[in-house]
Image: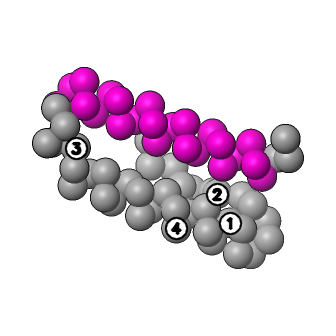
Amino acid sequence: MKPAQTEVTLLHWKLIVSELGCVIRAGIEACVAADAQILIHHHNAILSSFGDGTCETGSSARWL
């Protein structure tokens, strides 16, 4: 697996783990609004990292 693919895979796993933690702590209803913001931020960070050719997510993707 290439480094860029590894980074994207790790970001997706972080999202899944974060979601599970949210559901366990607060219940599904409390996570809906937060999920929308996390997903937008997460995918914007990935798209921008590929857009400039560096495939580095940087601080903009550190939402955990």
In this view, the mark in front (4 or 2): 4
3D distance between C-alphas at marks 3 and 4: 20 Å
| Image position, residue 58 (x, y; %) | 63, 57
3D distance between C-alphas at marks 3 and 2: 24 Å
Q: Residue 49 carries which label?
A: 1
Task: Mark 3: give few (<14), some (14-19) or many (20+) Cα within 10 Å.
Answer: some
Label 3: which secondary element? helix
| Image position, residue 34 (x, y; %) | 26, 51
Asked if marks 1 and 4 touch (Cβ < 8 Å), the reply is no
- Mark 4: which amino acid? Asn
Pointer 3: what residue? 31
> Does the stretch in magenta take in 64?
no
Pointer 2: what residue? 57
| Image position, residue 32 (x, y; %) | 22, 50
Label 2: which secondary element? loop
Q: Residue at x 14, y 42 (%)?
A: 29
Query: What's drawn in magenta, residue-wise?
Result: 4-26
Q: Where does the C terminus fall, quadrant-wise?
A: top left
Earlier sequence position, callout 3 versus callout 2: 3
Q: Residue at x 63, y 71 (%)?
A: 48
Asked if marks 4 and 2 touch (Cβ < 8 Å), the reply is no
3D distance between C-alphas at marks 4 and 2: 10 Å
Task: Mark 4: give few (<14), some (14-19) or many (20+) Cα within 10 Å.
Answer: some
Earlier sequence position, callout 1 versus callout 2: 1
- Mark 3: which amino acid? Cys
Q: Which mark is residue 44?
A: 4
Earlier sequence position, callout 1 versus callout 4: 4
3D distance between C-alphas at marks 1 and 3: 26 Å
